[in-house]
Amino acid sequence: MKIKNGYKIRDIAGEHVIVSVGQLHVNLTKIISLNDTSVWLWEQLDGKPFDAGTVADLLTGHYEVDRATALRDAEAWIASLRKADLLEA
Amino acid sequence: MIRLRIADFRFGILSAKEAALRQLMAANYTPFLCDDEADETLLFTLDADTPVHRPDAAPAVTFDYALTDSPASLRIYGDRYQLALTCPPAERTFTLECLRQADGRFRFTSDLTLQGVVPPRHFIDHLLIFALSLAAIEEGFLLIHSSTIVCEGKAVLFLGESGTGKSTHSRMWLENIAGATLLNDDGPALRVRPDGTVTAYGTPWSGKTPCYKAESYPMGAFVRICRAPYNRLSPRLDAIRALGATLPSCLPILQHDDYLLDRVCANLSAILKTVPAFRMECLPDGDAARVCRAGLQDILG
């Protein structure tokens, strides 16, 4: 899977957010808030193909976390990106 | 030249058919004319008598939408923005071109007077809104889709999707809250200054309500209106929810290009530093206005 093209992390009102603008006639602006870990993962993975294993590797390499927990967190992170429609394939 | 002052920005419209344009614009622009200030510098001049050519290359962004019953299309070619509005019966298309120059300022040209028919007034409104939004975006200018009242000298902006009852809620204030007045019913302007103060301005763009006031007030609060079977005002929204409550009410045509969206977000960010946002779940009744007014006691006094 990959992060969809055209999204950018912006600092607004002291928060890290992704603004997702509806492409159709109606205005469907969505705002997705990212915590510091999400921002870091996003920066590492933007533009590259990855899976839960890749995300877990990044987490174990950067934070003090065991592999099983990292994998569970990775899957949860991917699920929330998918729910916000920010992933392709 | 037709000289206008909106949100303390002066700009001009240059056309050989100035008299016809003036007549068309008289109903809602008269309070904003500043022809007597010929010495003042203009933020921009819109040349309304120039053909606009579509570049051969495909646009990087195309955003098609409907302006009431008329097809509208924004096409972005790098630094060139073309906004085209088509009048259905005659299939006439009026286009505004905004070209961002090396110094960051925009040059505006339009074929508004060249189509052999008079453009509908709401086309002029929409093109001027876009032109001013681009020209003033670096100066903290932001047009907000809202119905706006003034109470105790402060502006309160009611936000919400079309049909959620913004105007109705404003009317409830006018009928039930002593001293409340309407500033604008559709598109007031906000301006955030470098020192952080935020001012709300009346504009010529007020939807179906003829309320065209060249007045300004310190900003009080944003209130997002949601229909509910009861009346309740939320506590002040946190940053993310305040953003979610306000960003969808900024002009959609400024949100399809990174350059513009960056600046919309920066202006909104600066505004939300000082201006609180709330969510009002309400019925369309007088009690809604009283509940909202009571909840804003800290802001309005």
Image (cartoon, grey):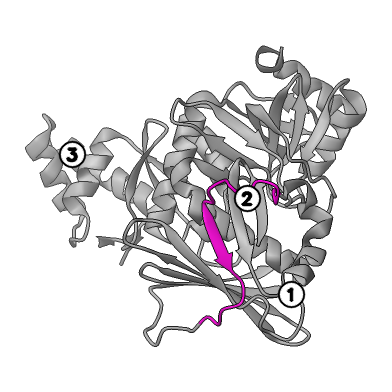
Picture coordinates of residue A34 (x, y %)?
Answer: 34, 39
Horizontally, is B194 left or right of A60 in the view?
Answer: right
Picture coordinates of residue A8 (x, y %)?
Answer: 32, 52
Give yes or no for residue B144 being in the magenta stretch.
no
Q: For the residue carrying disc 1, how many other residues have a C-alpha within 10 Å: few (<14), some (14-19), or many (20+)? A: many
**Circle number at residue A70:** 3
Q: Which residue is mark 1?
A: B119
Nearer to us of marks 2 and 1 is 2
The span from disc 3 to disc 1 (Cα, nearest Å) is 61 Å
Q: Which residue is mark 2?
A: B38
Q: For the residue carrying disc 2, how many other residues have a C-alpha within 10 Å: few (<14), some (14-19), or many (20+)? A: few
Q: For the residue carrying disc 3, how many other residues have a C-alpha within 10 Å: few (<14), some (14-19), or many (20+)? A: many
User: Which residues fall within the magenta stretch?
Assistant: B34-52
The N terminus of chain B lies in quadrant: bottom right
- Type of residue at label 1? Pro
The C terminus of chain B lies in quadrant: top right
Chain letter of the residue carrying label 2: B
The span from disc 2 to disc 3 (Cα, nearest Å) is 67 Å
**N-term mark: 2 or 1:** 2
Nearer to us of marks 3 and 1 is 1
Q: Tell me where residue B180 sits by quadrant.
A: top right
Under tag 3, what secondary structure?
A: helix
- Residue at screen point 26% across, 34% down: A36
Under tag 2, what secondary structure?
A: loop
